[in-house]
Image: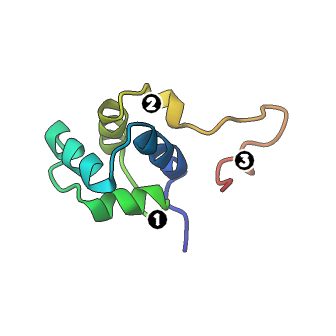
Amino acid sequence: MKQRNFIGPEIRKRRNELDWTQDALADQLQLAGWETATRSTVSKIEDCSLRIDLRQFLLLAQTLRLHPIHFLPKLDWSKPVKGQIFLP
């Protein structure tokens, strides 16, 4: 499966920290303004198979109560960025 986003693992980690199910996160996303969010949407985000836009990214950060920078991968600036972004 082609990877569409690289924040899925961080989304799953934070959701688990909050002790939320995928359904609960979908409900919170709907309340925040992502009207079409479902459990399936959350599942696809977490397995990196769903591409999300900037608005959706910001809604995820707001809903999960984290600054958006926390979802970005940690980079080793001594190596090329291209090879680091899609690490599992």
Q: Is residue 14 left or right of residue 62?
A: right
- Secondary structure at numbered mark 3: loop
Label 1 or label 3, whichever comes before in sequence order: 1
**How far separated are the C-alphas under marks 3 and 2?**
18 Å
Residue 50: x percent and y percent?
A: 41, 61
**How far separated are the C-alphas under marks 1 and 2?**
19 Å
Depth order, front residue of 63/55: 63
Q: Is residue 16 left or right of residue 74?
A: left
Task: Kindly give the residue lying farthest to the right in the view shown.
Answer: 78
Residue assigned mark 1: 49
Task: Kindly give the residue lying farthest to the bottom in the view shown.
Answer: 1
Residue assigned mark 2: 68
Label 3 or label 2, whichever comes before in sequence order: 2
**Disc 1 residue crowd, few under 14, some 14–19, many 20+, Cα 10 Å:** some
Identified at 36% across, 48% down, the residue is 53
Q: Quadrant of the N terminus?
A: bottom right
Identified at 23% across, 55% down, the residue is 37
Q: Are marks 1 and 2 in contact (CB under 8 Å)?
A: no
Task: Kindly give the residue lying farthest to the front in the view shown.
Answer: 19
**How far separated are the C-alphas under marks 1 and 3?**
18 Å
Question: Which three-letter amino acid code belongs to the residue tagged 3?
Answer: Gln
**Disc 2 residue crowd, few under 14, some 14–19, many 20+, Cα 10 Å:** some
Q: Quadrant of the C terminus?
A: bottom right
Depth order, front residue of 12/37: 12
Residue 35: x percent and y percent?
A: 14, 50
Question: Which three-letter amino acid code belongs to the residue tagged 2?
Answer: Pro
- Secondary structure at numbered mark 1: loop
Identified at 75% across, 51% down, the residue is 83
User: Disc number at residue 84?
Assistant: 3
